[in-house]
Image (spheres, helix red, strand yellow):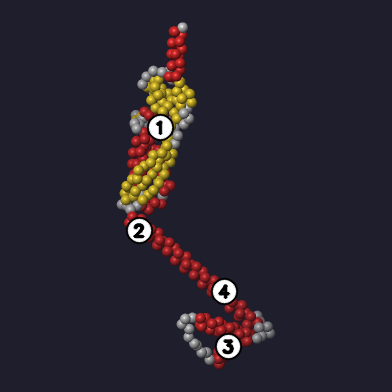
């Protein structure tokens, strides 16, 4: 009876020792006798106790690296403080364990140097304006840095750099901070640009208003001229219009702070009306002579 109990206990211990539960979103790397054997997927897995050993269990979900603010000199010799975040995940558990030591630390250092390299090649204006392009450049360089590189030597492919087994998902630039004096200059430049645009728009508006006013005056003059030529009492109408304009001008002059009294000789004003009326009559007569007026 005792041997049976012992065997049962051994089997129970073996089952407990061989059963490994891997949570969803994780993977585990198993070595057998010191060599890479297989990868355990999420769920219940079994290994050989004492022979197999789990050397690594990590998440395959998206992770992030917060890059500390870096002081970088741009191509036009301006100091910038740049803060970035790199989002990544493990794509191959085996490569991430065997091909690089301290994966998090290596990625942090690589992201830092890549960030400094990309921004140092740009001017201040380019760094502020090309946000999307700069993020794409950093992501591309990081992806190239963590991928396997092969070189053909004597007709054979030779691996010169191992794949880190990670995928760079995206790079976000959190903040680009120039020095205070540069910030002040940029604000002043922006304010000057806004004022310049406002002045241009104001001038354009004034020009259009003047053109519309001139066009309205021209059409009004055409209407009045046509009406005077075709009306038998054109002289009286013209006198009325001039008198009305004179009264309006007097009102405006009276409202002005620098108003002055102006006396106009009515006799001369009447002579002026006569001359205008005669000019209109002459035009009408010529028009009739050319066949365009009434006989």
Q: Residues within 10 Å of mark 4 (few under 14, many from 20)?
A: few
The residue sitting at 58% across, 85% down in the picture is: 243
Residue corresponding to mark 2? 185
Q: Residues at badges 3 and 1 in contact (C-beta under 8 Å)?
A: no
Q: Dot 1 corresponds to which residue?
A: 165
Q: Position of residue 90 (x, y in %)?
A: 42, 33
Q: Which mark is residue 174?
A: none
Q: Residues within 10 Å of mark 3 (few under 14, many from 20)?
A: some
Which residue is the site of mark 4?
216
Residue 14: x and y in percent read 44, 16
Residue 65 lies, in percent from the top left, at 39, 39
238 sits to left or right of 5: right
- Of residues 70 and 141, the one nearer the viewer is 70
Q: Which residue is mark 3?
A: 273
What element does badge 4 sit on?
helix
Q: Secondary structure at mark 3?
A: helix
The residue nearer to you, when weighing 90 against 210, is 90
Q: CA distance from mark 4 to mark 3?
A: 24 Å
């Amino acid at each position: 009876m005792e041997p049976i109990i012992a065997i049962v206990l051994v089997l129970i211990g073996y089952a407990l020792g061989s059963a490994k539960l891997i949570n969803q979103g994780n993977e585990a790397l198993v070595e057998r006798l010191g060599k890479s054997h297989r990868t355990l997927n999420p769920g219940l897995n079994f290994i050989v106790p004492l022979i197999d050993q789990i050397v690594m269990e990590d998440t395959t979900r998206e992770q992030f690296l917060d890059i500390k603010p870096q002081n970088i000199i741009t191509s036009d010799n301006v100091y910038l403080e740049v803060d970035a975040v790199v989002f990544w995940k493990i794509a191959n558990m085996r490569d991430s364990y065997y091909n690089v030591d301290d994966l998090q630390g290596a990625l942090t250092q690589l992201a830092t140097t890549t960030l400094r390299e990309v921004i140092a090649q740009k001017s201040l204006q380019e760094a502020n304006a090309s946000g999307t392009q700069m993020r794409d450049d950093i992501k591309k360089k990081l992806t190239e840095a963590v991928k396997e590189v092969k070189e053909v030597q004597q007709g054979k492919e030779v691996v010169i750099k191992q794949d880190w087994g990670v995928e760079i998902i995206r790079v976000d630039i959190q903040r680009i901070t120039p020095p205070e004096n540069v910030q002040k200059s940029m604000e002043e430049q922006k304010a000057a640009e806004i004022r310049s645009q406002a002045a241009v728009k104001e001038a354009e508006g004034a020009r259009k208003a003047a053109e519309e006013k001139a066009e309205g005056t021209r059409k009004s003059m055409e209407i009045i001229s046509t009406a005077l030529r075709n009306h038998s009492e054109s002289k009286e109408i013209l006198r009325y219009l001039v008198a009305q304009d004179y009264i309006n001008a007097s009102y405006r002059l009276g409202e002005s702070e620098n108003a002055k009294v102006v006396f106009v000789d009515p006799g001369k004003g009447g002579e002026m009306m006569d001359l205008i009326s005669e000019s209109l009559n002459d035009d009408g007569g010529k028009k009739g002579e050319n066949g365009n007026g009434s006989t």
